[in-house]
Image (cartoon, coloured by chain):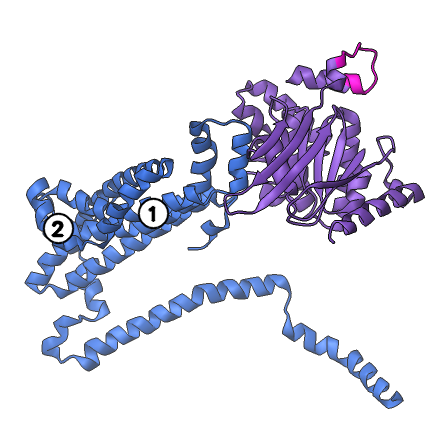
Amino acid sequence: MFILSTFLTVALKGADVPTTAEATLEATLRFEGVDKHFDNGTTALTGVELSIAPGEFVAVVGPSGCGKSTLLRLASGLDTATGGTVHAPADSVGYVFQDPTLLPWRTVLANVELPAELAGTPKAERRDRALDALRLVGLEGFEKQLPGQLSGGMRMRVSLARALMTRPSLFLFDEPFGALDEMTRLRMQEELQRIYAETGFSALFITHSVTEAAFLAGRVVVMSARPGRITASFEVPFAHPRPAELRYDPDFGRIAGEVSAALRGGFQ
Amino acid sequence: MSAHVTVTAQSEDVLPATDYTQATPPAPVRRRRARAVAVLTPLGSLGVAVGIWYAVSYLLLSPARRFLVPPPQQVLTVSFLDWTHLQPMLQALWLTAQVALVGLLIASALGVTMAVLMSRARWLERSLYPYAVILQTVPILAIVPLIGLWFGFGFTSRVVVCVLIALFPMIANTLFGIQSVDRTHHDLFTLQRASRWARLRKLELPAALPSVFTGLRTSSGLSVIGAIVGDMFFKQGEPGIGTLLDVYRSRLQSEDLFAAIILASFFGVAVFAVFTLVARLAVGSWHASADRP
């Protein structure tokens, strides 16, 4: 799994490694006509068609309760589809929850180490990887702190580092910055897309913020209200890493406006 | 309009210098006052209680009936300051403490184990929990004769009483703690394909620890009560403090009776304080409940 993701990273960054056809054509994640009904009678998703290429960052926007989170639970295998098929990576995915979901009795370092610890990675190796991940999210020097001593933004960074730890080929983000204040939220968006530019993973990012989606993703997908289905898709053709000022760029604004309009159309 | 403005301007000039300093003294002074209040208030209520005690002894009771509530200084001189009276009490208290501790250890181990088992399978919980509840509701005194028949009338039976009385809070609190683990935390472990053992050891048990300590504090108090009740009914072997209470009652040694009651109460408070401290050391750094007594 590690080898695969490294290979993808290298391939996507355009290093002179011969890319095989399978690696580029094979989608990292693919939904084919996916339905999800719950036992209580609600239909969360109908006929979802979505494909994420290796190294592609796709954001999903939609009204609340449209089944966005269900999409992630299906992609990660936490839940199974009632119709259609989900092709997901066989290795573990990096899942960043809405809340940081840190274990309050573990230090920052021990929290980040957890996935590798559960996978049985030797202690020295997982320590090194955890320290690398913490450095990547800018939390050097906070290893010994407990989550309760950190701010909301820092806790989310730890959560991000923990997901980076497994070096997954696919990241799933479930509105990770939704609970943060505006300033922290913007900073976290910039950090995340810097990390994305550095490591080149594939990502499915759920949010209800149109600008967040457009700023982070190469493609923004719009979902309708429940039952959720995909109604529109927009390319956001700016190269990563993107500067913070991109948010005030007229072209960026135009795309965000189109996404917004499509989102409003979904309410009718 | 202009007059109004002048008035407010004047009052603003004058007020801050006087009013504000009176309202809020500097932080260290406030803290010292708060600490003084925290110490003095309970001492004050203790003074009032002793005062009432004196009033009952000397004003309410005739000298002939004063043995029912002997005045405080008499309890002090006759029992606490006389080593021949105090020594057997302390020795008995030590024995009772041992009974309570052994009972608590068994109840904790058994309670946590049962709770873990119940949390593993719904059918186990359904079949075991009702009996745990029954254990809690059956009056312990009703089964004391049976315990005596089965386990004899000595140390073992006293411990059995402690276990029976202290078991339920351990089961209930541990089970509650395990069952209230966050769903997203479970998702986190599911994503990593964690084994059931890893999930128990690294998620469920640590998360349940604050609840386990809440149970432990309740059970420790109950275990002390159980040990004293056990002393009263199972008198073979060395006497516990409960045995002595019964002896003093039958001999009308009311000063000793009062002294023994006070000692037993202090012991109960000490046990509670120790387990509060243990809880704070164990989970206080990450869980706020440990701060509350």
In the image, is residue B41 part of the stretch drawn in magenta?
no
Q: Are marks 2 and 1 in contact (CB under 8 Å)?
A: no
In the image, is residue A13 part of the stretch drawn in magenta?
yes
Q: Residues within 10 Å of mark 1 (few under 14, many from 20)?
A: many
Chain B colour?
blue
Magenta-colored span:
A10-21
* Image location (x, y in percent) of residue B182: 51, 43
Residue at the image point whose x is 12% and y is 54% from the top: B142
* Image location (x, y in percent) of residue A257: 86, 47
Q: CA distance from mark 2 to mark 1?
A: 22 Å
Q: Report the residue marked by disc 1.
A: B172
Residue at the image point whose x is 79% and y is 79% from the top: B12
Quarter of the picture containing the N terminus of chain B is bottom right
* Image location (x, y in percent) of residue A201: 73, 26
Q: Secondary structure at mark 1?
A: helix
Residue at the image point whose x is 54% and y is 25% from the top: A117
Residue at the image point whose x is 14% and y is 57% from the top: B245
Q: Report the residue marked by disc 2.
A: B143
